[in-house]
């Protein structure tokens, strides 16, 4: 892992893009710790909060439809520079919302901008992998996980010195914007136009299968992010200082796994990684919902983190190299499923929790991660070893 990180850091443009991945989770981790307070301040029930969170996937869908137009005109580096700064301002307003209308507008904008930022950053990593002839996708996603772990730990520290979430996000956003400005020349150096304005194609069953696995992986991550703090507080009755440690353990496991992921994937194979990871994540969620002991629940979330860590890098790399599609189209088709899972999954958990309780609601994720493992086993586009044989775009593989 150390050797991989050192070689990655030496490539300054890659490090600048990697920081953008960390930026997303630094913001999101601060958001996670703020959810219980926002729920109380704005008077949400589990069900109404879950319904409100649906605005983010609606924004993501809007971003999907805008993506081909935007990335056929705006260089990817220019979008990354301004897009992530905009996301910082959105999150500051979201966490400091004074009423539900302001909160809802921010959620919608967050979904749209996050989708466009994700497409631009992942497409750029794919370009850099070819330029530098080395795998980087898992390492960059490891930066995302590292940001989540740092933000969760930072939340514990700042809460302990009585700095509330509203000020926490201001501190985090100001720091991020400063680093992005210092990295400006490396980001703007990516002047590729990553879409040719061709029309979207309907996804084949191959792509739908990958999109489903991506949906489940993101759904798991989104539910850990949005509900772990509430689960620790309301079900396990954890002290306030510990409510974000479930997400912190999850993020730390994701970080360790992803920083080793590029090496591990090349040795073990993509298909085996995704299948084994799905089974481990399922076991982790089973551990969480069947224990009443906080440390064991944290262990469960760590298992989920290790299970999910390499799945998304495998899927994103595959989606960027689908024959007959631009990287924007490939990412859009696959990550649409991912974002739907990430942003609607917490809402579904909220609806079920309203009727049956949060423990039973989270049990849905046990089944979903098992189904993802089956889908990976059946999907011939996820290969154990690199191959020069290209699958036709419209090949039906089920």
Image (cartoon, grey):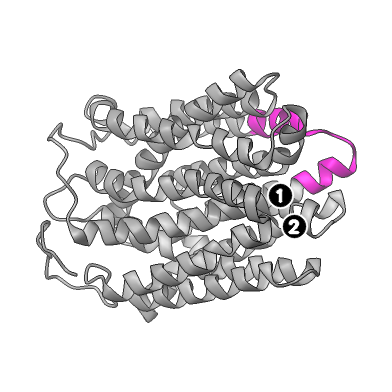
Badge number at residue 152: 1
Regarding residue 136, the answer to whether it shows in the image is no
User: Hey, which quadrant is residue 285 in on the image?
Assistant: bottom right
Residue 372 shown left or right of residue 145 in the figure:
left
Image quadrant holding the C terminus, namely bottom left
Q: Which residue is mark 2?
A: 245
**Residue closer to the observer: 76 or 203:** 203
Q: CA distance from mark 1 to mark 2?
A: 7 Å
Give me the residue at 53% from left, 75% from top. 280
Badge number at residue 180: none
In magenta segment, residue 165: yes
First in residue order: circle 1 vs circle 2 = 1
The answer to whether marks 1 and 2 mark residues whose Cβ atoms lie closer than 8 Å is yes
Residue 119 shown left or right of residue 246 in the figure:
left
Image position, residue 128 (x, y; %)? 32, 50
**Residue closer to the observer: 87 or 395:** 395
Residue 241 shown left or right of residue 255 in the figure:
right
Give me the residue at 71% from left, 49% from top. 152
Question: In this rendering, is residue 357 above or below 71?
Answer: below
Image position, residue 206 (x, y; %)? 21, 62
User: Hey, which quadrant is residue 186 in on the image?
Assistant: top left
Element marked by disc 1: helix
Regarding residue 153, the answer to whether it shows in the image is yes
Element marked by disc 2: helix
Give me the residue at 35% from left, 29% from top. 62
In magenta segment, residue 305: no
Region rendered in magenta: 155-175
In the rendered image, the residue lying farthest to the front is: 355
Label 2, residues with CA under 10 Å away: few <14, some 14-19, many ≥20? many
**Residue closer to the observer: 101 or 138:** 101
Image position, residue 4 (x, y; %)? 48, 66
Prevailing SS of the magenta stretch? helix
């Amino acid at each position: 892992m150390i050797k991989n990180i050192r070689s990655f850091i030496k490539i300054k443009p890659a490090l600048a893009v990697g920081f953008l991945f960390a930026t997303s989770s630094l913001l999101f981790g601060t958001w996670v710790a703020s959810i219980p307070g926002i729920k109380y301040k704005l008077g949400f029930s589990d069900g109404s909060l879950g319904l409100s969170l649906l605005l983010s996937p609606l924004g993501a869908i809007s971003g999907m439809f805008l993506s081909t137009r935007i990335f056929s005109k705006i260089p990817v580096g220019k979008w990354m520079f301004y897009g992530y700064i905009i996301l910082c301002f959105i999150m500051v307003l979201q966490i400091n919302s004074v009423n539900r209308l302001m909160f809802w507008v921010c959620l919608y904008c967050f979904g749209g901008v996050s989708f466009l930022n994700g497409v631009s950053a992942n497409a750029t990593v794919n370009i850099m992998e070819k330029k530098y002839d080395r795998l980087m996708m898992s390492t960059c996603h490891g930066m995302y996980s590292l940001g989540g772990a740092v933000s969760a730990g930072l939340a514990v520290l700042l809460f302990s010195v009585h700095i509330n979430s509203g000020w926490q996000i201001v501190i985090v956003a100001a720091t991020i914007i400063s680093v992005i400005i210092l990295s400006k020349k490396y980001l703007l150096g990516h002047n590729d136009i990553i879409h040719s304005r061709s029309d979207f194609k309907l996804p084949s069953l191959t792509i739908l299968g990958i999109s489903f696995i991506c949906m489940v992986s993101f759904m798991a991550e989104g539910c850990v992010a949005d509900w772990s703090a509430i689960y620790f507080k309301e079900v396990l009755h954890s002290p306030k200082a510990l409510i974000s440690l479930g997400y912190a353990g999850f993020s730390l496991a994701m970080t360790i796994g992803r920083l080793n992921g590029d090496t591990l994937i090349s040795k073990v194979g993509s298909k085996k990684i995704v299948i084994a990871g799905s089974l481990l994540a399922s076991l982790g969620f089973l551990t969480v919902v069947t224990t009443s002991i906080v440390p064991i629940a944290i262990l469960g979330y760590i298992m989920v983190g290790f299970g999910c860590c390499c799945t998304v890098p495998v899927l994103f790399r595959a989606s960027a190299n689908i024959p007959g599609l631009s990287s924007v189209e490939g990412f859009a088709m696959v990550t649409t499923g991912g974002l739907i899972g990430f942003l609607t999954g917490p809402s579904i958990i909220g609806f079920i929790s309203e009727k049956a309780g949060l423990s039973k609601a989270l049990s849905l994720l046990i089944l979903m991660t098992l189904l993802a493992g089956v889908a990976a086993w059946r999907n011939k586009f996820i290969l154990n070893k690199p191959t020069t044989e290209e699958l036709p775009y419209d090949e039906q593989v089920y």
